[in-house]
Image (cartoon, rainbow, N blue to C red):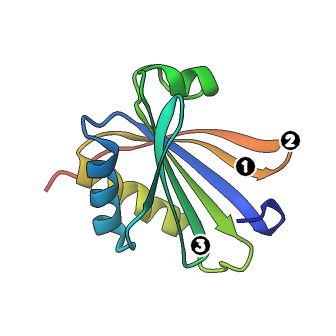
Amino acid sequence: MDIDNISKIEHFSTFVDLSLKEFCEQLSSVLSLPQMTFITEDERASAELSFNGIDYNVSRPFKIGTLNEWDDSVPKDHNFGLVLSIDKTNTDFNYTKLEEIGNLLSTNFNTDLLHYRTWFSTGFSTEKVHIFTPNKK
């Protein structure tokens, strides 16, 4: 997605004892998404998907603590980063949708999910400290 077409970017992190492939399969199932494309780089493996005006990017660095090195808002023990880039044409995405996604993922993976940043434009972002906790069934 072209940066000029992004209205905002939501940043999440968590610790889950799964491979990137397993995590993305569950993510796709829970959010009813198509299969993601996988990429391997020097420091991390990642997967991405553009679907219905949202770019999904999942990062799983090879070394615990890397996400924290990249952004000290992320706890040192988190091993997954999830970034949702929202296209300006996606007028359906709002805070209620963000909460729905956060709650679904936290409950599905049975772990706390940290929403730690919303990016609005170059040089302008807001740090968050909202933790989604699993719903007890």
Q: Label 2 belongs to which residue?
A: 123
Tell me the element at label 1. Answer: strand
Question: Which residue: 29% across, 37% down?
Answer: 16
For the N terminus, the quadrant is bottom right
Q: Position of residue 45 (x, y in %)?
A: 45, 40
How far apart marks 1 and 2 lie (CA) works out to: 8 Å
Question: Which residue: 47% across, 46% down?
Answer: 46
Whichever of callouts 3 and 2 sits on the residue coming sooner in the sequence is 3
Residue type at mark 2 is Gly
How far apart marks 3 and 2 lie (CA) works out to: 22 Å
Q: Is residue 110 left or right of residue 7?
A: left
Q: Is residue 115 left or right of residue 4?
A: left
Q: Quadrant of residue 85?
A: bottom right
Badge number at residue 105: none
Q: Kindly tell me whether residue 79 is visible in this rendering.
A: yes
Question: Which residue: 24% across, 34% down?
Answer: 17
Work out whether residue 134 or residue 19 is closer to the camera in this orientation and state it.
19
Q: Is residue 6 left or right of residue 9?
A: right
Q: Label 3 belongs to which residue?
A: 93
